[in-house]
Amino acid sequence: MTADDAAPRLSLPPGPRFAAVGAEFVRGAGAAGGIEARLADRLALIAEEVLAASPPGAGPVSLALHDRRHAVRLELGFPTADLDLAGLDQARMRDPEDDAVGLYLAARLADQLTTEPVGRSGLLLGFNLARGYAPRSLDPPPPGLGPLAGAPVDPDDATLALLVDWAEAEGLGGAGFRIAPRVLDQRAAGELFARVALDARRRPIGGLLWQPFGRRMMALSGPALLLPPGPACEALAIALLDAALGALARGSIQGLVVLDAAPDMPRDAFEVVGHLPDAAGTPQPVLFRALEEDPGGIAWVPPLLRDWVTRSVRRLGLGRDLGEPPPPGRATGAVMAAETDRAAGRVTLRPLLAAGDAAAVAAGNVALFRGQGFGQFRAVLDLGQPGHAAFAEGLVQAGLAPAALIPDAAGDLLLLAALE
Amino acid sequence: MSGFDLERLVPAHVASFQAYVPAPPDDVLLRRFGVTHLHRLHNNENPLGPPPAAREVLARWDPAQAAIYPQGDGWHLRRAIAAQFGLEAEQVILGNGANEVIGFVIKAFCEAGCNIVTADRTFAVYEWLASFSGIEPRLAPLRADGFDEAALLRAIDAQTRVIFLCNPNNPTGSWWDHARLERFLEAVDGRAIVVADEAYAEYAEAPGFPDSFALMARHPNLVVFRTFSKLWGLAGLRIGWMAAAPAVAATVRKISISYSVNLLALEAARASVWDTAHLAATRDHVRQGRAGLAALAARLGLPLLDGIGNFAMLRLPMPDTVAHRRLMARGVMARAMTSFRYPGWLRVSFGSAPAMAAFAEALEAVLAEV
Ligand SMILES: Cc1ncc(COP(=O)(O)O)c(C=O)c1O
């Protein structure tokens, strides 16, 4: 949840009677806050569908509209988690007469759907829509940058923007170092962090970015290095990484994940925890750097992945008790959330709610998105949660294979992937 | 109970703080890492254990006494410590480990809006205790792996109440001598409490290590921490102490927790003060450990960072957190230093000879795997 107390809010009774009021609120608040009508309309539809689909017993539904600059976000809060989330699972929806159709439509309208518990028993649904950015022309970096002067800094906006522009102009740093206005907006929203190295004239000569990856990890992107290849450039990469590690040490973040490493990422500072296919289908190493000592933990592993996980645990030297997960308590009603990246043709699935039909629901999700033309599939299971294991069977049936084990003593993340 | 809204009741600085999770007990670690023994080189403990007189106190102890409260503020022990260092008993305050004393000082001097100043790469507890008490920790970067007075002085402002110096510094072993500490106290000029955490002072053999108790007479804002956990081998009993000028000590005493140090700890510590034979034997052991580790580092071509204390740091050509795990899987516990903002470094305590040998063998094997 964003701690954005200035966001316009409204509380409404659940059910169809007030759904239109919710939609009008979103449109009106969006217009007053300067959100483009195109985005506000989509969020208004989402609000309407979710309100209409919420059962009378759900208690008052809170609506909050957040402008995070690079994205707009509608949050719908429920005082109880009793809401039947099945409708949010895009693969489950078959019958348009079903009450849950609204949730299904809402999930399809969003670029990203998140769910999180609030308080002791509440639930928060977040629907994100990404903003577009107009293309700009970029100047290349000036000649003669460097050498590194002092420790990398948490940069001001102008310095960060300059670095991203220069990296983009040179094609350096990977996908993270593109579209400076987006990078600045993400940072302003608290969803992106940076360290930038400067030369004696305080010009940016390199940088590293990171963004939340689950609750306890950060995903690194970069580095973008503007020095010519050589020892000074290698030292720059290490200085940036050390600065990032120093910034994150002693906090809640357990580790850094690199899903697509720029060529200049210092490999020695990481371990390889698996491989993910890139867009061309070539396996690329998944890099990981733990920040904290790993005192061992429990991993709940579905029987069908036991061999693979056991091998990974041994190879990585992890101290793990491997447990066979108990069957989920609920017989039916398993739910997965899907995060779609339409431009990349990629969908990432995460379990929301475990139940006995988890395998079928997982397979159904893959089939659904395959039918919509998505070509890259990823799933993230938290092996610290016994319920997540139940989804594995369906994912494997649908053609996903275990790709990486990201260590976290409180719950290793198992990445599964398939490329069509 | 429907009115209970936990979130409303929790201060923001507590809500945002990440709880420290101690490692599980050895039996759990043994099972998870599939080993039958774990050598403890991670907590800077003394492998020689407590001095003989303290052992005797423990061996003689009558379990029936467990029913009785200890004396509430360590009357006898405070007198023994005061006599050893030429202080008044009122200047000495005991705690359940030096860690508790850190909390006393922050509680006594800091309120909302204040800050403490310390280094970025030092013992974590100053920073943590401040953070979860709603006090801003200001972290001055080390310079050449040691506390940097210029950076510390720059970090001080009108809101600064306490400056924590770790002398010698855990984990680098770097230290300030008497003259340097005195110059710093003069520069601070009474604007804040200056804590010299001397948890490892008993390991200092170099001439010139501060006589902080003497400095305290001229600089009443100086507070000194000591502990029985390190050289005195009583870490498991949890007992540490601080000394300060009488008025400062009287202030801290107001918020200190009476009865927080247990009977056994009080008696064992009192019996330990000031066993010079144990001191000499431990220093001798540390000299050997230090020489052995230096030889290992040289043989493996690993940079070594070493100073005063029963530990040193090695720089590895791999992530320290990976080395930590792989050493665990070979039965050796050492400290990964990323969390001390020394990524790639491992801190090793000078343990028993077999533990050091096991470490050397395990480290070579781990490095061979990279
Ligand atoms: C510098 C420093 N101060 C204080 C302590 C805490 O000691 P105690 O065991 O007395 O709480 C330690 C323990 O590691 C330490 O290294």
Image (tube, rainbow, N blue to C red):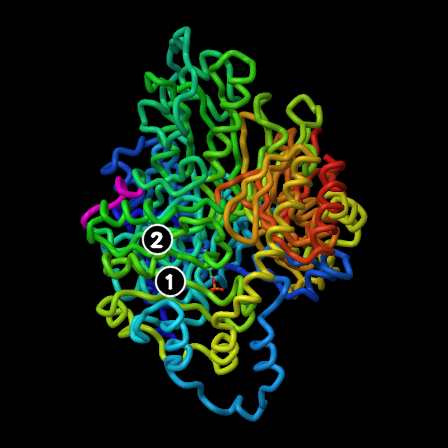
Q: Position of residue A360 (x, y in %)?
A: 70, 50
- Name the one closer to the observer, A37 or B107: B107
Give the structural element (helix, strand or loop) at label 2: strand
Res B346 seen here = yes
Labelled pair 1, 2 in contact (Cβ < 8 Å): yes
Q: Quadrant of residue B82?
A: bottom left
Q: Mark 1 = which residue?
A: B102
Q: Chain of mark 1?
A: B
Find out if the beta carbon at label 1 lies less than 8 Å from the nearest ligand 1 atom: yes
Q: Position of residue B40 (x, y in %)?
A: 65, 58
Give the magenta-colored segment's residue range. Answer: B152-158
Q: Are marks 1 and 2 on the same chain?
A: yes
> Pointer 2: residues within 10 angstroms few (<14), some, or many (20+)?
many
> Pointer 1: residues within 10 angstroms few (<14), some, or many (20+)?
many
Q: Mark 2 = which residue?
A: B164
User: Which residue is drawn at the image coordinates 37% and 62% (left, top)?
Assistant: B102
Residue A179 placement, left or right of A272: left
Residue A215 placement, left or right of B181: right
